[in-house]
Image (cartoon, rainbow, N blue to C red):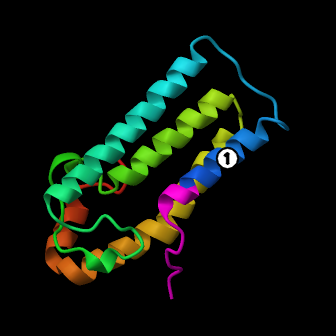
C-alpha cells in the first residue's frame, strides 16, 4: 500500500524553508553579489507558476485540494499543464531554491532533492493513482506527452 498524502504541500514547503533558515546557524554560507535579488526573483517565479496553475484549475472548475485528489472533476492538460504535470509543486521547488540561495546554505544541495523525493512519494504518486482511476486512458495519454516535473 502506497504511503498517502497527509500534510498539505504548502506546509511541507514551509517546513523545508524553515529548515534552510535554521541550518544557516550551523553551516558555512555562500555569499555572492546580487544574492538577495536572485533569491527574490526565484521566489517570485515560483509564486507566479503556482498562481497560474491554481487559476488554470479554477477556470476548469476542478479541485485544487491536494489532500483529496479523487474529487477532481476535470483533467487539466492545457496552459502550464502542457509543460509540467505538477506546476504548483514545481513552483514550490523554485521557492525553496530561492530560500536556499538567499540563505547561502550549501545544504540546499541536500534539501532540494529531499523535498522533491518527499513530494513525489507522498503527494504526486497518490495524485497520479487517483487521476488514473478517474480519467483512465485520457490520463495515460497525458502521462506520455507531459513530464512529471519539466
In the visual, does 117 lie left or right of 150?
Answer: right
Looking at this rendering, what residue extends furthest in the bottom direction? 1
Residue at x 65% of width, y 14% of height: 32
Residue 6 within the magenta-colored segment of the rendering: yes
Residue 42 vs 150, above or below: the answer is above
| Residue 145 picture quarter | bottom left
In the visual, does 1 lie left or right of 68?
Answer: right
Looking at this rendering, what residue extends furthest in the top direction? 33
Per the image, label 1 sits on a secondary structure element best described as helix
Mark 1 Cα-neighbour bin, 10 Å: few <14, some 14–19, many ≥20 = some
Residue 64 within the magenta-colored segment of the rendering: no
* Camera-side residue of 12 and 2: 12
* Camera-side residue of 147 and 67: 67
Q: Main secondary structure of the magenta part?
A: loop
Total numbered labels: 1
Residue 58 vs 74, above or below: the answer is above
Task: Give the x, y percent position of residue 93.
Answer: 49, 46
| Residue 11 picture quarter | bottom right
In the visual, does 58 lie left or right of 6?
Answer: left
Residue at x 33% of width, y 42% of height: 49
* Camera-side residue of 12 and 31: 12
Query: Start and end of the magenta stretch?
Result: 1-12
* Camera-side residue of 123 and 63: 63
Task: Give the x, y percent position of residue 75.
Answer: 18, 67
| Residue 107 picture quarter | top right
Task: Give the x, y percent position of residue 59.
Answer: 14, 56
What residue would you read off at disc 1?
A: 18
Task: Give the x, y percent position of residue 84.
Answer: 29, 51
Residue at x 30% of width, y 57% of height: 85
Amino acid at each position: 500500500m502506497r504511503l498517502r498524502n497527509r500534510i498539505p504541500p504548502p506546509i511541507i514547503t514551509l517546513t523545508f524553508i524553515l529548515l534552510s533558515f535554521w541550518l544557516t546557524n550551523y553551516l558555512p554560507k555562500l555569499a555572492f553579489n546580487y544574492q538577495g535579488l536572485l533569491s527574490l526573483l526565484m521566489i517570485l517565479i515560483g509564486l507566479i507558476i503556482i498562481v497560474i496553475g491554481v487559476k488554470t484549475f479554477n477556470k476548469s472548475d476542478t479541485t485544487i485540494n491536494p489532500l483529496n485528489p479523487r474529487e477532481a472533476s476535470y483533467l487539466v492538460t492545457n496552459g502550464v499543464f502542457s509543460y509540467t504535470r505538477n506546476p504548483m509543486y514545481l513552483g514550490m521547488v523554485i521557492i525553496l531554491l530561492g530560500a536556499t540561495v538567499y540563505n547561502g546554505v550549501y545544504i540546499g544541495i541536500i534539501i532540494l532533492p529531499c523535498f522533491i523525493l518527499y513530494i513525489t512519494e507522498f503527494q504526486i504518486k497518490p495524485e497520479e493513482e487517483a487521476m488514473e482511476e478517474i480519467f483512465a486512458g485520457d490520463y495515460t495519454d497525458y502521462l506520455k506527452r507531459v513530464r512529471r516535473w519539466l
